[in-house]
Amino acid sequence: MPVDTPASSATRPHVVIVGAGFGGLEAAKALRDAPVRVTLVDRNNYHKFQPLLYEVAMAGLEPDDIAHNVRNIFQGNDTVHFRLGTVVGIDTNARRVHLKGGDPLGYDFLILAAGAVSNDFGIPGVREHGYPLKNVPDAVNLRNHILRQFERYDRRGGEGQSGALTFVVVGGGPTGVEMAGALVELFDTLNDDFADFDIREQARCILLEMQDGLLPPYQQSLQTYTQRVLEERGVEVLTNTAVEQVDAEAVHLNDGSTIPSQTLIWAAGVKASPVADMLNTEQARDGRVVVEPDLSVPGCPSVYAIGDMAAIEGADGFEPQLAQVALQSGRHAASQIRRRLDGAETEAFSYRDYGQMATIGRNAAVAEFAGGITFKGVFAWLIWVVIHIAKLVGFRNRLSAFVNWAYNYFTYSRSARLILDMVPISDDIPMEVEEVDREVKARLEEVKAEV
Amino acid sequence: MPVDTPASSATRPHVVIVGAGFGGLEAAKALRDAPVRVTLVDRNNYHKFQPLLYEVAMAGLEPDDIAHNVRNIFQGNDTVHFRLGTVVGIDTNARRVHLKGGDPLGYDFLILAAGAVSNDFGIPGVREHGYPLKNVPDAVNLRNHILRQFERYDRRGGEGQSGALTFVVVGGGPTGVEMAGALVELFDTLNDDFADFDIREQARCILLEMQDGLLPPYQQSLQTYTQRVLEERGVEVLTNTAVEQVDAEAVHLNDGSTIPSQTLIWAAGVKASPVADMLNTEQARDGRVVVEPDLSVPGCPSVYAIGDMAAIEGADGFEPQLAQVALQSGRHAASQIRRRLDGAETEAFSYRDYGQMATIGRNAAVAEFAGGITFKGVFAWLIWVVIHIAKLVGFRNRLSAFVNWAYNYFTYSRSARLILDMVPISDDIPMEVEEVDREVKARLEEVKAEV
């Protein structure tokens, strides 16, 4: 009796997914049991839980709490394969994705989920002197820098240290608010570390926002609450304020004033990943690929763009760049591929907004759910903590993040206060070799000057 | 009534301790309540638990499990102050320690506890191509490299990959044995990650030892057991074998043979920290400062050298470079300073050997206690685990390490399989700027070629 041989997986349609963030990972999961082969490409071997990157930068969590090995997620699954690689070109005619230093990947369907990168809006000095926060090395690097500023200040007894302990956070969206709230908590921990000077008096956290309130998309009452809590905790909030220029020692504002500071944390905005530029199709002002209602790229029905790199028309302009949009659009693209395989018409995507939330720090958060229900304070913070732990990938990450948070909560400490003598390699894609060189050199010079 | 003012701490004798490893930290703790001011200098802001560095390199633990912020240890203590700094010179006449980029520190007593650095014994290519394992960035870098080797192999379908998955560990002491044992366990985890090839067949771990058995200072039966267990688990053990030369693609041995390999893990030996060279006093062949019986430096009764950087005469030559020796000599130096302050004579140090242990991997370890009592197997392994968790500094580190180990034990996984796009800055002291540049450039080139 002949052995029953399943159809070889090599003959199945090949789906390439670029990016293992929320959108790409969700799409891959949705195709796990589909009659396809999936290759999930990312330049890192881990999925990072981006909403908690700021906690790594502020020494509250460690990288392994928020990052999860991608291969581990798909262990034992025959459909989804992972490929570590950097996309340097897309040929939609030949249906090929070009990878740096490797053979191109042919595809039958392509899902682009490369996300977004930091956007300096061309403001002079931000690229050279600003600290972005889009990936794990960024976060570790910012943590190292902040901790070094305090060590340096201590060593020099505070002399000639104008602005050494002034930390300017630019951008009053959730990332900026969360960062500022966590930073003043870090000040409290460090105040116990450094006996020789009063950090609560010497260190400043200034939060800049161009618009006239923090968390612009939230209801007015939550905006007011957020600003009040941050100010009570010591954050100096400047609204209607923009950065004109930055140098190594100061941040220059649009009102002509100057803040002496050696640390500009850039949470002012993002633009689409450079992968979006590889398609030769219409892009929004921030580089996002303008997609058809079914999320396919115009003229390329087998190519889908989702998440932060897609400009998806919604009721009020393009949908926001949120985890929820990425997850839902990832699922949608996967199900369109299934429909195509079944010979069915594709469907239009529609985003279902369940609400949004942001934490301000210990015992304080704001949340706004569908139907206009809002929460603020301790209850919102508890919801925030529970949801964020629940959404981390993998039991070990959840347990480890829980342990760290519980420890920090009860000890009023931020436990990950390690300065690692390592410098990041930027993950802008595709960066020129000379640029990497320059960047690493610059960071290295800085580190050497400080040590 | 006048307020009772305690003697200003500024008038107390100043003790400078260089190095926050086992020895320096123990000395600082022993002086916590002494009538002195202590400045503890280290070039990192954390104490690292060196015996578990290999677990970080082998993706079993994360850096924050084995590293603990030094300031945190002395929070609330008025006697001990921490200073982040790199020692670049010692002036025993003027009683000053010179720090890179900062004012010199004057001292009344000096404890040198700068430890040891990797020793390439001048073997060509080891410095350029070998992976040392003496600090946390080393460990993270080695972890990144090992994981990248598998990603690279997978991407190229194994073609032209001679030696890509051959990992050569040099040195059959505890570090080499622990590393080899952990590496074959990592192979098992990765075998589930990579479906396209059989790692148990493709990947090799070769352990080289110059002498004719592993763990030379242990009893013969434990040596034999160690080798047998490692070989059963897939490690190829080559004794009586030395490395002649290394290049990017191969390790050349003293018997004329060549092992194609892109990874040489260097656990063959150490030499004293370059701080030992700053004293102009007698040094042992490996650079250690030859000390007086009371651990003071000859001719400098106020300067003590302890731990891995001190050559301490014992019953059988110099005492070994073990954590126990560092801890005991740190306590001894601290108590000599107390005696000196009390006007008493100093005492000779005598090392009390409680025994030694090494783990081979899951459920297997060897232990040898005072009085010739030995254990091997599961029981020795349990003792090893309990002691190592108990000895970690800080409750959070112990809990976190326990969680990670328990998770890995029950899931047969190594959870910290993250490739971080960061390159280390070498912490050789005092390294020339050009050397740092060259090193970072070389590592960067390597990373770029791989990504």
Image: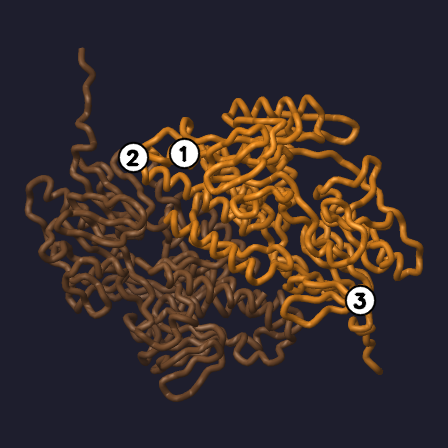
Chain colours: A brown, B orange
- In the picture, residue B123 is in which quadrant? top right
Residue at 27 percent of width and 60 percent of height: A273
Furthest residue to the right? Answer: B344
Furthest residue to the front? Answer: B256
**Amino acid beneath label 1:** Ser
Q: Quick one: SS at disc 3?
A: loop
**Amino acid beneath label 2:** Asn
- Pointer 1 residue: B162
Chain letter of the residue carrying label 2:
A
- Say whether mark 2 and mark 1 are on the same chain: no
The span from disc 1 to disc 2 (Cα, nearest Å) is 29 Å
Residue at 37 percent of width and 29 percent of height: B198
Q: Badge 3: few (under 14), some or many (20 or more) residues near its Cα, within 10 Å?
A: some
Mark with earlier residue (1, 3) = 3
**Amino acid beneath label 3:** Arg
- Pointer 3 residue: B95
